Amino acid sequence: MTQWNLQGTYFESCNCEAACPCVFTSPPTEGDCKALVAWHIDKGRYADTVLDGLNVALAVHAPGTMVATKWQVAAYFDDQASAAQNDALHAIFGGKAGGHPAVLASFIGEMVGAASVPMHYHADGRKSSLSIPRIAEVAIEVLDGQGGKPITIEGHPLAIAPGKPATVARSSVMTFSDHGWDWKFSGRNGFMSDFAYQSA
């Protein structure tokens, strides 16, 4: 299997109230979960292909408890990627290259589409956002806990970034429109953290 590794930041936003119960394998607060998950790769390599600076996002719909139902997913890949980089991102985030993305891919029941698109990702440790023109606008901000410190969740079983504490956030905007899905909500759950993935 091809050797690869990625590290960077990620965030997610969904329609659940904060903090989302799905990460504890509980039912979503509204019966289903509509989520957008985004990654920015600070440093990455797939064999000899460098992946630094690229972005990936998944729009996910789970019709019930996320570990008990199969997900519908639409995938978005950075249009700045070369053909070789695009192939590498598809292999990794499609679950074909092993590692934690393969675990996440095991929950997918239907891929409704995949596209290369312009992606504008921002993260400063307190705020994270993603813009995909005509498709998605998402922005979340860290919730303050005791003494103004971030609220974090560690060791949760349904983790996008295993081994990293997830910082709890709340959305200021979350809109997504594609593949017949039309999601619009704000003031709902968000998580953000660093991530590090690698081949098995």
Image: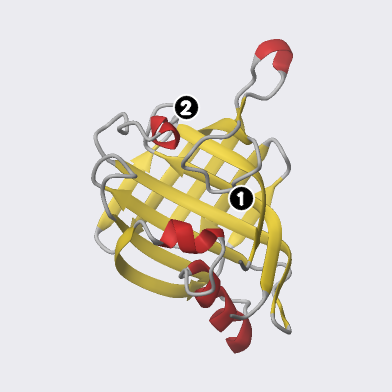
What is the quadrant of residue 187 in the picture? top left
Residue occupying the point 35% across, 61% down? 73
Q: Whole-percent x and y of residue 149?
A: 72, 20
Q: Is residue 90 visible?
A: yes
What element does badge 2 sit on? loop
Between 35 and 25, which is closer to the camera in this rendering? 25
What element does badge 1 sit on? strand
How packed is label 1: few (under 14 Cα within 10 Å), some, or many (20 or more)?
Answer: many
Q: Which mark is residue 10?
A: 1
Q: Earlier in the sequence, mark 2 or mark 1?
A: 1
> Rounded to the nearest whole Å, what is the CA distance between mark 2 and mark 1?
17 Å
Q: Is residue 169 left or right of residue 44?
A: left
User: Outermost residue, top direction?
Assistant: 147
Q: Provide the residue designation for mark 2.
A: 19
Q: Is residue 78 above or below residue 140?
A: below
Residue occupying the point 37% across, 37% down? 15
Q: Is residue 136 left or right of residue 55?
A: left
Q: Whole-percent x and y of residue 48?
A: 73, 84
What is the quadrant of residue 164 in the picture? top right
Q: Quadrant of the C terminus?
A: bottom right
Callout 2 amino acid: Ala
Q: Whole-percent x and y of residue 132?
A: 50, 61
Q: Quadrant of the N terminus?
A: bottom right
Callout 1 amino acid: Tyr
Q: Is residue 104 above or below residue 47?
A: above
Q: Is residue 178 visible?
A: no
